[in-house]
Every structure is written in C-alpha cells, then in structure tokens.
Image (cartoon, rainbow, N blue to C red):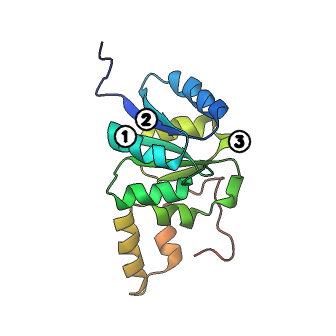
Amino acid sequence: MNSERSDLQRIVVVDDSDGFRSLLQWFLGSLPEVQIVAEARDGVDAIAQVERTKPDLVLMDVCMPKLDGLQTTRKLRTGGESARIVLLTAYGDTIPRWLAEEVGADDVLDKSNLGERLREAVVSGVRRLPKIEERNERSHEGTHGGTQEGANEGRDEGKTVGNRTGEK
C-alpha cells in the first residue's frame, strides 16, 4: 500500500544517536503534515538516502562519524541538492551562523531547545538562511558600498547561533 501524499513534508533524519533518532521519529510522528522517508547514522549514508528519496527537508546532526553535518551539507549543496537542510547541534551556539550559511544550511537548531522551533522548521517550508546564490549576490553588493549589517537585515536572530568576534 502506498501511503505517500503530495501534501506531506518528506523528511530524512540523520543522527548517529539511535536514541535521538527515535525521539525525532516520535516527535515528527505527532505532526500530521510529515512523512519520514529515510534515516541515516552518518554523513555518507545521509548522502545516499537523500539521493534515493529526494526529500523536502533533511534534519541532520552536526557531529557524526565519517562525514559531519557541515561536510555533508556542503557535499549535498555542491551536488545540487535543493532540499531544505536544518542542522541540529547539542553544542548550543558553538556553530556560528556564518559557517552554517557557508556550507548551505537553511537553519541551525540547538537539540536542547527544539520544541516549537523544530515544528516551525518542519512545517514552514521557509529557508531561514540565504541560499548560496543570495549570499554570492550579497557579497558582490558588499563591494559596492553595502555593509555587512545591511546584508544581515531581515535574518532571524535565533537563540542557537550568535554573532561573536572572529566570525566572518
């Protein structure tokens, strides 16, 4: 029996922790607009599962064996993957927003404070961080009198990633 519906958010869950993947399955299973189409334990398997299933959203841990979430995101984007990618981290604000943007992630969420932010990331379908093309356009604008502050206007100032000295 084929239970796929076109109105569902097709999701791939990627995390090396069986317990956390189970928790995500439980939470996502409570959302009627979601279908988990695959799971992966590491970045290498994540790439294979994303290519096989063509999801709308990839929820991916940052720290994993073989390829971490940042490396995996970069490889997926370099390969032309257009699914939204939300990175999940247990390390709070240690993943700078600029780094997530640089590799092509759409958002970064702190695992210890997921709650409503995860639901919003799943059902909104909105890219929170700019696409690579938008970042390239902004970097060109910056050379013609634009400011970094202007390039950051309108971005979500989430609790999970802050702007610290030393970031690009």
- Reading the chain from its start, which is encountered first: label 2 or label 1? 2
Front one among 49 and 155: 49
Q: Give the side of residue 112 with respect to residue 105, left or right.
A: right
Marks 2 and 1 in Cβ contact (< 8 Å) = yes
Residue 14 locus on image (x, y percent) = 53, 41
Question: Which residue is outermost to the top?
Answer: 1
Callout 2: SS: strand
The amino acid type, in three-letter code, at marker 3 is Ser
* Residue where numbered disc 2 is placed: 11
Residue under label 1, please give it. 56
Number of the front mark, 2 or 3? 2
Foreground residue, 147 or 138? Answer: 138
Q: Nearer the viewer, residue 93 or 37?
A: 37
Residue at left offset 48%, top offset 66%? 102
Q: Is residue 104 visible?
A: no
Horizontal placement of 144 versus 98: left or right? left
